[in-house]
Amino acid sequence: MFSLSGTWDLYFGPQGKVKDIDEAKEKFQHIKATVPGDVYLDLLNARLIQDPFFGKNYLNLRKYEFYEWWYEKNFKVPKEFLDKKFKLIFYGIDTIARVWLNGNLLGKTNNMFIEYEFEVTGLLKEENNLIVKIDSPILWAKDRNYEAITVSWEGREEALWLRKAQHSFGWDIAPRIVSSGIWKDIELREIKDNEIEELYYATVKVEDNLATLDIFFKFRTNLQYFEEFILRFTFTDKDGKKQIFEFPVEFITGHIAINLKDPLLWWPKGYGEPNLYEVKCELIYDGEILDEKINKIGIRTVHLERTETAEEGTFKFIINSIPVRLRGSNWVPLDAFHSRDRERVIPVLELFNDLGCNIIRCWGGGVYESEEFFDFCDSHGIVVWQDFTFACARYPQIEEFKKTVEEEVIKIVKRLRNHPSLILWSGDNECDYAYNLENLLPSDNILTRKVLPSVCKRLDPYRPYLPSSPYISDMVVKSNGKLTPPEQHLWGPRDYYKSRFYTENKAKFISEIGYHGCPNLESLKKFIPEDYLWHWDNDYWRLHSVEHWRSKRRSYNRNELMANQIRELFGIIPENIEDFILASQITQAEAKKFFIERARLSDDIWGIIWWNVIDCWPQISDAIVDYYFNKKLAYYYIKRVQEPFCIMITEPESWYVKVVGVNDTFIEMQGTYRIYDADTKEELNSGDFLVSPLSKKILGKIKVSRGEKRLFIIEWELDKNKYLNHYLLGYPPFSLERYKEWLRIIMKEAR
């Protein structure tokens, strides 16, 4: 491998003003660029723009959407390279680009999500010149074909043809920063004469201490005859135990069935160990090893059991023949500038892991994550629900776009399909809504009903596919509101978190649900000018919530919503910033805790994926950790109620609340618990508990009156470890001053 990342020259100006790199050097501005990187970050480093994340600065970037960007790098290669075969690999170009090497046009790109390979055998010299010209995505989109069916129901039509992160065009979680750049690494890689090109490991079934695997292989060779080729697979488990299989192969591609004895299964967090095997595949000819590939794989089966409607039945994942209850969060873009993702991915995943999440849903408005992301999920037992990168729109249905999508999905499926953590391909985010809201049938969407499932079935037949999240069947559409999908995004009015919208919903799986919470004051000071820190109803607060470029089209003030949610719980909106922040964080924390508890206490709700862990830029949002990694109160509440075993209290019914132990593990849970009143310290319920695996058990009852406003503290001990939860009884409004006193008790040290 020969890296071409690092420092480049960058020339830029309004598109169409120059015809080649020489003219660009003469007429355009010139700065140094960093690869991987982003042109706006290069402009920032050159002090040509101000920090886009501060104040209103990102509004000044609009003019650059119409620029072209010329990257140039001169590099030397060793003499021995000239007699070998090489390919030039771009792991990510954003987005519309052309590439030249030593004056030779290698090709074009039109998709930020996939890698591009160009064979450069015979084109390399000792001294080389590489040029990448990136065009304006907006001007490229302007020349595409738009039809009546093609629409973004949130006003981002220019995004529809562009295979570029959809949040870039403005979202309620991201600013409009329509940038460009070489956002991933570039390398020269030697082309081997003999190479294993593809390996796909799929668990077909597990029974009687035997796992049956289907292995698809494909290799390339310059040898003319195949009769002496052998593939040797060595499976090594965590204890170093090896199982070796050898197969003569008669062609460059095929399937091999392997029966693995006494398999160590891969399990989601809470259900067992996420066991991984290291598998070495060796391509052997006449006793010589020509190539080898090493993968880490997990032995597990996965099935999605779902019905067309919530009224019919269910939506649950069956892993290794066991229905699993899932609790986790949506994965949104790590950074508004994706070249910075790599420095954030592990710290953010560690937050998910610390929170006890056993599922991540990769939301369709972002990018496909790295191998590092999936490796972490594999090794920590966090299952991944992967949306394809389409969101909140009706995308083009014509042949040209279908071919682009098919090429993308083929590459993505092949890259990710060996990861055991990946349990679902989902066609998109809320695109079925985009059809249904305008009385169209979502089943008419060729992309999610034909193109995507066809690729998944051909390349990854053992993993479930869901057309959309949420998937809206024709049965639901034609019921005129009488039927609902089993998997839902619960946003609605976002009123009191215990309102009927939340408590009476029929969803069997909640894949989005959220509640607003203000960042800490130290974080607000980093992106809002001091003169505008207070009051919350000003342009700077709005620009860093939902109101950015769409503010003229939609009269929706999310900060006002947040203030009203505070008023709902406390009866007032605090008049100073410190109390406003605290009241907001309490409101968010109580709401999200309640959503998770309701799902875990239910027999019918098999999963909840709340929105969301962390922001991709500094803002006021549903996230429980702000962009700067400062945690809101909800972080601590959620961590407690996502323990695999948790004691919770139900809502009052017939003058009582129930104390329930929820055990989402294979292990019998035994210990002691105590519940007391936070004010009087009166013990309300206590005792020993013994809760069977994968079950719930009522441990006791407490007589209550809904008219009282009380806080119950729940403590329990397991294996000498202490845990804590709490329950807020009564109707709002509560006293903020009284809650401050309660908060000291809630936040005392406990796991």
Image: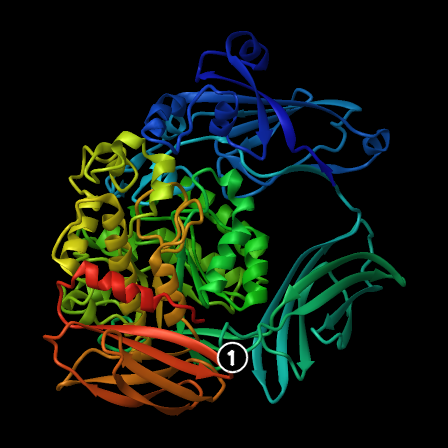
Q: Quadrant of residue 51?
A: top left
Quadrant, the C terminus: bottom left
Above or below — where is 128 with respect to 254? above
Residue lying at the far right of the rendered structure: 287
Residue 618: give x, y in percent of width and height: 37, 41
Q: 732 or 513, which is in the foreground?
A: 732
Residue 552: give x, y in percent of width and height: 19, 32
Residue lying at the far top of the rendered structure: 26
Q: Quadrant of residue 548?
A: top left
Residue at 55% across / 53% down in the picture?
A: 346
Residue 556: give x, y in percent of width and height: 18, 43
Q: 353 or 220, which is in the foreground?
A: 353
Quadrant, the N terminus: top right
Above or below — where is 131 with respect to 667? above
Residue 67: give x, y in percent of width and height: 43, 21
Residue lying at the far front of the rendered structure: 680
Residue lying at the far left of the rendered structure: 707
Give the left or right position of residue 424, taking residue 182 as reference. left
Q: 129 or 354, which is in the foreground?
A: 354
**Amino acid residing under circle 1:** Asn
Instruction: Please say whether residue 86 is visible from this viewpoint.
Output: yes
Above or below — where is 186 with respect to 391? above
Residue at 46% across / 60% down in the picture?
A: 352
Instruction: Please say whether residue 153 is visible from this viewpoint.
Output: no
Q: Quadrant of residue 524?
A: top left
